[in-house]
Image (cartoon, grey):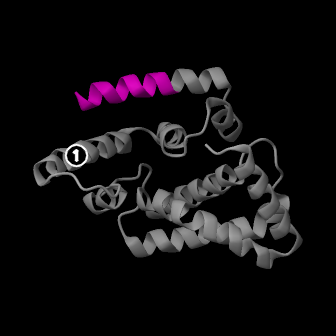
Amino acid sequence: MGNNNDFAEEQKLVRLAQKDKRNFAALYGKYYPAVLGYIRKRIEKKEISEDLASKAFEKALNGIDNYQWQGVPFGSWLFRIARNVLNDYYRSQGRRTPSVSLEAVEYMVKDKEPEPDEQVVIDEDEYNLYKTIAELDDDDQYLVYYKFFEGLTNVQIAKITGLSETNVGTKLYRIRKKMKGLLE
C-alpha cells in the first residue's frame, strides 16, 4: 500500500491529532477524497455520499484518542468506520446490499483518454465489473475493496476483518472464481 515513510508520516499525523484535535485537519485533507470515493462507489446520490463521508470523519475525530497503531494503517481504521457508517445507512433505509448506479460507476472511471470506440468497451466492462461486485454479499465486497482498491495485503486485511490470513486468501480466491463465472 505505502512505504515505511508513508506509515511514519501517518503515525506522526495521528499522534499530533491525538494531542490536539485541531491537527486532525491534516488527516482529513489526506483521506477525504479516498473516503468520499469509497462511499460514492456504493451510494447513488452525491449529497448523501458527502453527508456519510462527513459522518465517518466526525466519528473518526471523536474516536481518534482510542486509535492505537497495531500494524494496521490509520487509513484502514478510517475505512472500517466508513464501512460501519454505510452499514448503518443501509439498515436505516431497509437495504442490506448496496446497489451501484451508472452515475456512481461513471464517477469511478479513472482519468484516461482512450478513443471513443475504446471508451464504450471500457465503460461497459467497468460497469459489468462493478455490477458484479455489487452482487456479492457485503463481507465479500469489503474483501475485494481492501485487496484491489486499497491494495492491502492479506495480513492487513486479516487484522481489519478478524479473519485468519489463510481464510482471507481462500475467500479472495473463491470470490475471484465466482466473479469470473458471473462476468462470463
Question: Residue 7, relative to residue 28: is it above or below?
Answer: above
The residue that mark 1 highlights is 122
Magenta part, dominant SS: helix
Q: Residue furthest bottom?
A: 22
Q: Residue furthest left?
A: 117
Instruction: Judge left or right: residue 22 versus residue 43.
Output: right
| Residue sitting at x 74%, y 44% | 4
Badge 1: how crowded within 10 Å, few (<14), some, or many (20+)?
Answer: some
Residue 13 appears in which quarter of the rendering? bottom right
For mark 1, give the secondary structure.
helix
Question: Residue 65, relative to residue 170: is it above or below?
Answer: below
| Residue sitting at x 46%, y 61% | 37
Please tell me which residue lies in front, 30 or 139: 30
User: Looking at the rendering, in which quadrant would you find the C terminus?
Assistant: top left
| Residue sitting at x 78%, y 79% | 22
Q: Residue furthest right?
A: 19
- Mark 1 residue type: Ile
Please tell me which residue lies in front, 108 or 57: 108
**Region in magenta:** 172-184
| Residue sitting at x 71%, y 54% | 74
Instruction: Judge left or right: residue 120 versus residue 8.
Output: left
Q: Is residue 176 magenta?
A: yes
Residue 32: x percent and y percent? 57, 67
Residue 53: x percent and y percent? 55, 68
Q: Is residue 26 magenta?
A: no
Residue 69: x percent and y percent? 82, 49
